[in-house]
Image (cartoon, rainbow, N blue to C red):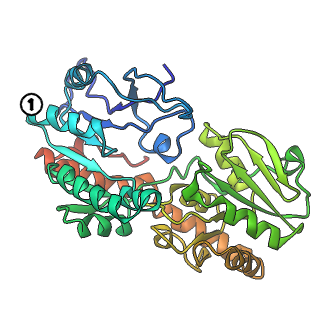
Amino acid sequence: MSSPSPLRSAPPAQSGWPPPARRLPHLVDVTLFFAPTSGGVRRYLPDDVVTFGSPAIPFGRGYRAPLGMARFRAQLRALAPDLIEVGDPYQLAWQSLRVARELHRPAVAFCHSDVESLAHAALGAWSARLVRRYLARLYGQFDLVLAPSAHLAQRLRDAGIRPVEIQPLGVDVDVFRPDVADPGVRAALGIPADARLLVFAGRLSPEKRTPVLRAAMHRLGPGYHLLLVGSGRRARPASNITLVNYQQDPRQLARLLASADAFVHAGDQETFGLVALEALACGVPVIASHAGALPELVDATVGGTFRPGDARALATAVGGLFERDAGPLRIAARRRAEAHSWQAVCGDLLARYERLLGIRARAAWGPRRAG
């Protein structure tokens, strides 16, 4: 079924002869946000997927509301996990904790969202205080809390949550790479061949600050063109802006990213910035808002940052980028992404699992070197 899946399961060892020297640890990653148009979560450790049927949320762009928690717990127990990881701080987190206790298994919370900041932006300081207390109560019951960036880890520690460890996400450098650029993209989309092509990809939700991008494009004028990937429709709201649909296939997204001259990100609430890392892997310089976790990935070596919410500053940063030599920028961008490849970051993640499981999982389950 194509509904979002709250359960993603890393498979245990297969049966057969000769038997494996050690049964592979069985990890179950529980997530609520797994819709057809969800962003980086669909590209984060895409292992075997087990779906849990739930009713669709009206106007929810494919997301669903989890109901029937007794059935969910039974399904989670049936997977016989050695370790349960939870990616969302909502109802499924509490239910997963309950199952972990019943099975005497370790539970890990991987915090991907700055829920406190989102609450503050939507409802004000009073709601942020309530959220902070809620998160402290929930995450205080996990064996370990992971955050993908130093920015988010500090936010959690400020809320009194311990222990919190930084676990960056990774990028598939075999899919996102410079040589997948397609010279035919511009012609296919009607983008002038001589325009400097900028791209942004992601959910066009309020925290992405796409109005700032549009205002900057108005300032930059016809010599620049912005490709917005993720609108759910194909349109041209301005002469130098093109909207195209969300790309479910990572290879198609990589093709669009690699075909651009620069990637621009005006969002101010990113807790990691996976799509910016994917652009870097394609050898594309990045101009990003100096907010959230984006400055941990983006600096003058691979592009630059600008004052959050300031369209004039964004336009200035983009113009300055094209006054620099593109060659060194592209090389540096690719090298930075390679340092964040899944092969590079998985060792730390597996070591954390190993510590919680009390076994040497890396020897049996870790990535193998070629040759």
Task: Give the structural element (helix, strand or loop) at label 1.
Answer: helix
Is residue 341 positioned above or below 317 on the image?
above
Between 115 and 177, the one nearer to me in the picture? 115
Label 1 neighbour load within 10 Å: few <14, some 14-19, many 20+: few
Locate residue 309, reporting x and y percent: 61, 72
Q: Amino acid at mark 1?
A: Glu
In the image: residue 52, left or right of residue 186: left
Locate residue 72, reporting x and y percent: 27, 24
In the image: residue 54, left or right of residue 318: left
Between 5 and 67, the one nearer to me in the picture? 67
- The residue that appears at 70% across and 64% down in the rendered structure is 213
- The residue that appears at 53% across and 29% down in the rendered structure is 58
Is residue 290 positioned above or below 194 on the image?
below
In the image: residue 195, left or right of residue 351: right
Can the viewer see residue 162? yes
Is residue 342 positioned above or below 261 on the image?
above
Q: Would you identify the image quadrant in which residue 94 lies?
A: top left
Residue that mark 1 sits on: 102
Locate residue 84, reporting x and y percent: 23, 38
Is residue 98 positioned above or below 197 on the image?
above
Locate residue 293, reporting x and y percent: 45, 67
Between 174 and 9, the one nearer to me in the picture? 9
